Image: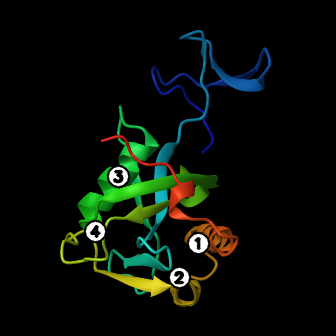
Amino acid sequence: MDLNFCLECGTKLVLKECKGEGEVPFCASCEVFRFPVFSTAMSTAVLNREMNKILLIQQYNRKHYILLAGYVNKGENAEETLIREVKEEAGLDIIAYEYMRSEYFAPSNTLMLNYISVADSEDLSGISEELDHAAWFTLEEAEKAIMQGSLAERFLLNIIARLQQGKTLDSLTFPVR
């Protein structure tokens, strides 16, 4: 997102050298640099305990399958978001997780933080109205079912590659309860 006007006072921003940062938008009225503003969200490949199935969801009346995701709330860290979103949307408790990688998603001006996580069960009876459908897929099925050419697919393929290299439940982080 291009920053042309100050978000505080509306003054047109000018590029000014900021030590160690290069040229950064500057508000002459507020006398402060205005760094880019964007949303932060997390997405996760939720795995079963055996780490051989992945939960994929359908949402917003769309036919394609995606990973479970959600925006980080003010005052919340990404790991708290992960645990909250999986519980709210799928009714599952996360017993382990690991940060994988991030990627900027231009269509929604969002920095996406991707995780691999493990749920306490495969019981999908608690899915919320936010989801149209949720289902467990084997790794091979998930590769075929995920929305092709999407950020979710790139994250999923990276996670499947890590799983095929022998990642186990003990190598993940366990949430502090």
- Vertically, is 83 above or below 124? above
Say which amino acid is labelled 1.
Leu
The answer for how far apart the CA atoms under marks 3 and 2 are is 22 Å
N-term mark: 4 or 1: 4
Q: Secondary structure at mark 1?
A: helix
Q: Residues within 10 Å of mark 3 (few under 14, many from 20)?
A: some
Q: Which mark is residue 156?
A: 1
Q: Nearer the viewer, residue 28 or 40?
A: 40
Say which amino acid is labelled 3.
Ile
Q: Which mark is residue 146?
A: 2
Image coords of residue 8 (percent x, y): 45, 22
N-term mark: 3 or 2: 3
Any part of residue 113 in sight: no
N-term mark: 3 or 4: 3
The answer for how far apart the CA atoms under marks 2 and 4 are is 17 Å
Residue at the spot x=19%, y=77% of the render?
125
Colouring style: rainbow
Image coords of residue 157 (percent x, y): 65, 74
Disc 4 marks which residue?
90
Residue at the spot x=56%, y=65% of the render?
168
- Vertically, is 61 above or below 156? below
Image coords of residue 16 (percent x, y): 75, 19
Query: Looking at the image, do the residues carrying marks 1 and 2 touch, with CB atoms under 8 Å apart?
Result: yes
**Quadrant of image for the N terminus:** top right
83 vs 138, left or right, is: left
Query: Looking at the image, do the residues carrying marks 2 and 4 touch, with CB atoms under 8 Å apart?
Result: no
Q: Nearer the viewer, mark 1 or mark 2?
A: 1
Q: Residues within 10 Å of mark 1 (few under 14, many from 20)?
A: many
